[in-house]
Image (spheres, grey):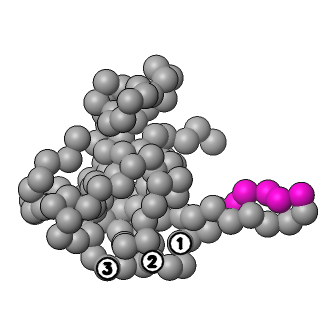
Amino acid sequence: MPTDDPSIQAGELRHTVTFLRGVQTGSPPVQTWTTAASIFAAGIHASIVPQRGSESPGSEAAPPNVQMFEITTRAPRSLAGVRPKMRIIWVDAAQGNLLRIFEIDDVTDVGMRRRKLVMTCREVRA
């Protein structure tokens, strides 16, 4: 659960992520994922912390086989378009290997000051 402190400690954002949005294409419609054009979405530095099911916000706990994560980034205007149901991919910055895919369940602008964005996400199994 995010605290009201919008500060981010040096070295806290050590992972590189990219934000994706869903796009319906074709007939019949098929859901595909593309880099979110409305925001600067690639190469964002983030903190990725696994959460236990009981730490998930909201009235419904995550099913036991779903891993929840708290992902934190700085919150510049370029990330103002981040919404639930978007996806985040975590890529190894050095080698470019895809490490994990997350779906955003909740987005919090900590302190409502556009400094720190905290997202509650669930891992998407490919």
Residue type for callout 2: Ile
Residue type for callout 3: Arg
**Callout 2–callout 3 Cβ contact below 8 Å:** no
Query: In which quarter of the view is residue 116 placed?
Result: bottom left
Q: Which residue is rendered at x = 43% and y = 71% of the image?
A: 81
Q: Counting residues from the N terminus, which is met first, the one under dot 3 or under dot 1?
A: 1
Query: In which quarter of the view is residue 90 placed?
Result: bottom left
Is residue 99 placed above or below 13 in the rendered structure?
A: above
**Residue bearing mark 1:** 36
| Magenta segment boundaries in residue numbering | 28-32
Give the Cα separation between the discs numbered 2 and 3: 8 Å
Image quadrant holding the C terminus, namely top right
The extreme top residue here reads 64
**Callout 2–callout 1 Cβ contact below 8 Å:** yes
**Residue bearing mark 3:** 77
| The one of 119 and 112 positioned closer to us in this rendering | 112
**Residue bearing mark 2:** 39
Give the Cα separation between the discs numbered 3 and 1: 14 Å
Residue 98 visible (yes or no): no
Mark 3 or mark 1, whichever is nearer to me: 3
Magenta stretch mostly in which secondary structure? strand
**How crowded is the residue under tag 1: few (<14 C-alpha within 10 Å), some, or many (20+)?**
many
Q: Which residue is rendered at x = 14% and y = 48% of the image?
A: 3
Is residue 64 placed above or below 102 in the rendered structure?
A: above
Q: Residue 11 location in percent, x, y?
A: 14, 59
